Image (cartoon, helix red, strand yellow):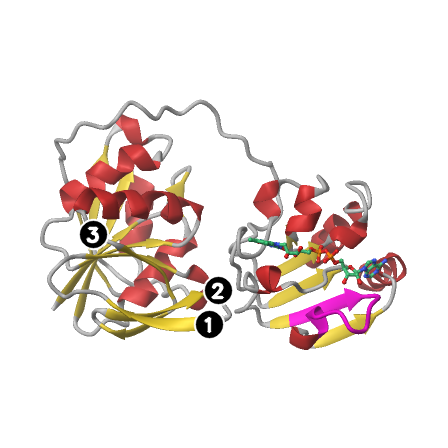
Amino acid sequence: MSKILIIAEHAHGVLNQSTAKCVACASEIPDAEIHVAVVADNSEAVAAAAAGLASVKSVICVDNPANENQLAAVIAPQVVALADGYSHIFGPSTTFGRDLMPRVAALLGVNQISDIMEVIGSHSFKRPVYAGNAIVTVKAPADIPVVATVRAASYRAVAAGGDAATSSASIDVECPEHTRFIELQTGKSDRPDLQTAAKVVAGGRALGSKENFELIFKLADTLGAGVGATRAAVDAGYVPNEMQVGQTGKIIAPELYFAIGISGAIQHLTGIKDAGTIVAINKDPDAPIFEVADIGVVGDLFAIVPELQAALSG
Ligand SMILES: Cc1cc2nc3c(=O)[nH]c(=O)nc-3n(C[C@H](O)[C@H](O)[C@H](O)COP(=O)(O)OP(=O)(O)OC[C@H]3O[C@@H](n4cnc5c(N)ncnc54)[C@H](O)[C@@H]3O)c2cc1C
């Protein structure tokens, strides 16, 4: 039997969907018993949500005021203290998991497997390399714990309907103080979260300025969509870094993705590999984005987007 511990991602008392996607991945492992660890300052609401996920057998709460700001350096030794007896320890390949899981692997003295996108067997997984242009099958040794991140975009969240037992663990580890929380800088937005939105409207360098990027925000608001951008648009200062989609940004899997004034560089495409319908607007008919788009519109975005906006609003 494989005993799998999933580290819950959460903020402000809300369980992030990435956790339910990790559960989906873990449940592909034959004969898996799945536990979720909620490392928090007040785990109650998150633990209740985790306990309600299908396939989860048990939720372990670790409450400590030091966990208020979810610092990877502080959480990692607590996860390691829980690790005994588990064959697998999984976290999501989101910013949270990418920060935390390598520390867990290092403290346990094992290598990490990054971005599991398919389970082949209990110790054999598929993962992308070269910005998603090749898929490799990796095999982990069976006699040490598998510490891994799960590529959230490759999995659908498990449904609710579970009724897992919840318990508290008191952990006696020294939380490091060399990493301290100073402040969280984040864009405040009422729009759907880019990583979990069903629809995303994204803009590229072609927008030309921060002011022009408002066209993208307006269209997104009309569609009830999240907003993404290319690295070129981020580097040009049109939008903040947290909106970057791609190899060095966020990997997303919306049902509908609008790529507006985006060339379709491989580093961008790797972030939308699992998107459903891709709609591209580009003035260059030979732009690589048209090779992956389901619907392509060749033309000037500054004419097409306002027209689309008017049609949708009217
Ligand atoms: C290691 C590495 C990591 C990277 N990571 C990422 C990443 O995570 N995400 C990412 O996005 N990029 C990433 N990049 C950068 C990537 O290679 C591209 O440079 C970037 O994606 C290009 O952004 P863009 O499509 O906005 O700009 P461009 O390539 O300049 O394309 C602009 C497009 O807009 C079209 N256009 C221009 N004007 C109009 C108009 N008026 N109407 C309609 N269309 C118009 C053009 O025809 C063109 O196709 C990375 C690069 C490297 C080397």
Viewer-nearest residue: 102 or 192:
102
Residue behind mark 1: 134
Image position, residue 124 (x, y; %) = 25, 71
Q: Total of numbered circles in the picture?
A: 3
Badge 3 or badge 1: first in the primary sequence: 3
Query: Is 255 covered by the magenta stretch?
Result: no
**Other residues around mark 1 within 10 Å, as few (<14) / some (14–19) / many (≥20):** few
Q: Is residue 161 visible?
A: no
Q: What is the C-alpha distance between the residues marked 3 and 1?
A: 24 Å
Residue behind mark 3: 110
Is 141 above or below relative to 167? Answer: below
Label 1 element class: strand
Give the residues drawn in magenta, as a range. 278-290
Residue at (37% x, 72% y) in the render: 136
Label 3 element class: loop
Left or right: 35 with respect to 223?
left
Q: Residue 130 got which mark?
A: 2
